[in-house]
Amino acid sequence: MYFRDSTRRYKDRLYHSLQLVECHRHPETRKPTTRVIASLGDLSKIEEGDRMTLVVSLARALGVLDLVTLSSDEIALADMGAATARTRSVGAMWAILELMRQLHIPEVWEELTSGRKNHRSLANHLTALLCNRLDDPGSKLSLLSWLERVLIPGVDPDDITYQGLLRTMDVLLEHKEEIERALADRLLTMFDTELDLVLMDVTSISVSTIASNHPLFAHGYSRDGHPERKQYVLMMVTTKDGIPVYHDVHPGNTADATLVQETMEQARKIFPNIDRCMVVGDKAMLSEENLAALAELGFDHLTAMPLKREASTRKIIEETHDELVQKAEDAMRGLEEGEKIPQVWTEVDVDDGRVIVAYSKTIAVAEASRRQAKIDAFDDKSALIEAKLQGKVKSRGRRLTDEGAFKQLIREALQKKLTAYFRIELRGQFLWVEPIEEAQEYASKCDGKLAMHTDNKDLGAEELYRIYKDLQEIERSWRTLKSAIKIRPTFHWTERRVRAHVFLCVLALVIERVMRLKLQAAKSDCSPQRALRELRQLMHVQLTLPTKNTEYNLLANKKPIQGELFRALEIEPLTDARLRKILA
């Protein structure tokens, strides 16, 4: 919502009017447009004094004007042509600062840096770095210009320098272990939980820098979709809610399985009071060697088993298929129309633990439908190519040969991931295509199933399934880290700065995940990103009237949703009185 000066011509005369308008999307076309909320009349007919009265009236109606500190007479008597006003976003900054205090980040940082002469400056620089990473992440140089658009209570933007930001990153990296331990202790206390379950995963971060010859940067399996770029690997250990408790950075060509033992040894060192803990990860990461190492360290494990690559798993799937289908049919009896079909489980004892097989009829039907659609499309493609080979269908260009048809079908099967279901061969000069019935039949038995291996003997099958589904939380953390927090691209040149950049992003992720958990607990439908967008609209207005040489600090653009978000985050709302007290 904003004011605009509308100009229209009637005959030979121009008319100027002040309108209050708002932006919205057209309900049918969904295109952005504006609509007039109110027309405030012809500006040329409103005297200067009346204009100021109008401004004051609007400010009162919108809750912008503090009547105790600023009156209409003061504005009317002031030389508004020489008055100055500055607006900066403050709502999101206040929320981030309060969440940092809840996590005791300022307290821990003060304790670690209190012996340094510049510890106050380091605290302000760390606050600016974390607020920027959550509000408008970018380079350190862009942060300096961002400071002109926001108000971080207690931080003077003139004291923030580029060299100070880099120096703060170096100090942050020096105290990584102490900060991680203190944060983990605070998180476990805040959410009244124990570190009895950790999620483990790895991702790759592409690098955009001229210093790509550094040993930390190397080509490897890219999860960013940029195999042409060098990268580094980030291993992260989180709680079951996806809150990071430990992370480390490794060269970009490091294999996933080689990181597990080292990571958990370090986690054991940082958190020596862990009694019994389960590590949840994927099969590629938890190799046989790693599982033995975890057992020696006193950790249980829970990992998904590939359904189609291992003979032992295939045997279990075939042995339990009929039992699971029957359980699903029994569970469907008595369901009313529209009710969700429940999942069913079974388990099999093996030499090195237990295998839990979960089955969802709903997911099975969806997977079978998608696979059959791809197979039908491939059959249609095969029939078309056969017709072209036989001359029944004309095509432009050179005549299709069996070798050319073979290449087309192989390419199609690879793209559709159907090479396991069809045998495509070039026998002599003839193309041969036939379905592999056994593969398609076994694939139908795998639909809707998840097989998990664990050495835990105490938890039930249903609880283990729920625990494995928690692994999705770390996937959400990766998405947040790469999208909202923008850990990539990384432009730093030295290894210690790269590690400090990653640590800074992980700290921002901790705050984001705490926000998410608090919003969920309050049953808010806002994501952390949307919450910050709403709070970002709460503005600080600094108005200076030159007649009295007086400065006024006000809050503008207040909305009810902002108060709701403050309460959901367990934060004291930012009011005009509190703002003046902070800025005093």
Image (cartoon, helix red, strand yellow):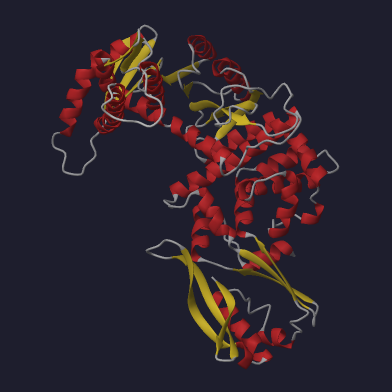
Q: Residue furthest right?
A: 117
Query: Is any atom of residue 119 visible in this view?
Result: no
Task: Examine the image and state in which quarter residue 325 appears.
Answer: top left
Rendered-image quadrant of the C terminus: bottom right
Q: Is residue 480 above or below residue 274?
A: below
Count all numbered tags in the image, as a single digit: 0
Where's residue 562, x and y in %? Answer: 53, 61
Apparent side of residue 141 relative to residue 59 in the rendered image (left or right): right
Q: Residue furthest left?
A: 334
Q: Is residue 545 above or below residue 302?
A: below
Where's residue 63, x and y in %? Answer: 57, 74
Rendered-image quadrant of the N terminus: bottom right
Apparent side of residue 515 relative to residue 422 in the rendered image (left or right): right
Apparent side of residue 456 relative to residue 10 in the rendered image (left or right): left
Where's residue 381, x and y in %? Answer: 31, 27
Viewer-side residue, 22 vs 457: 22
Where's residue 544, x and y in %? Answer: 75, 75
Query: Is any atom of residue 270 visible in this view?
Result: yes
Q: Is residue 450 above or below residue 70?
A: above
Viewer-side residue, 254 vs 434: 434
Apparent side of residue 408 relative to residue 240 in the rendered image (left or right): left
Task: Examine the image and state in which quarter residue 503 appears.
Answer: top right
Viewer-side residue, 122 vs 83: 83
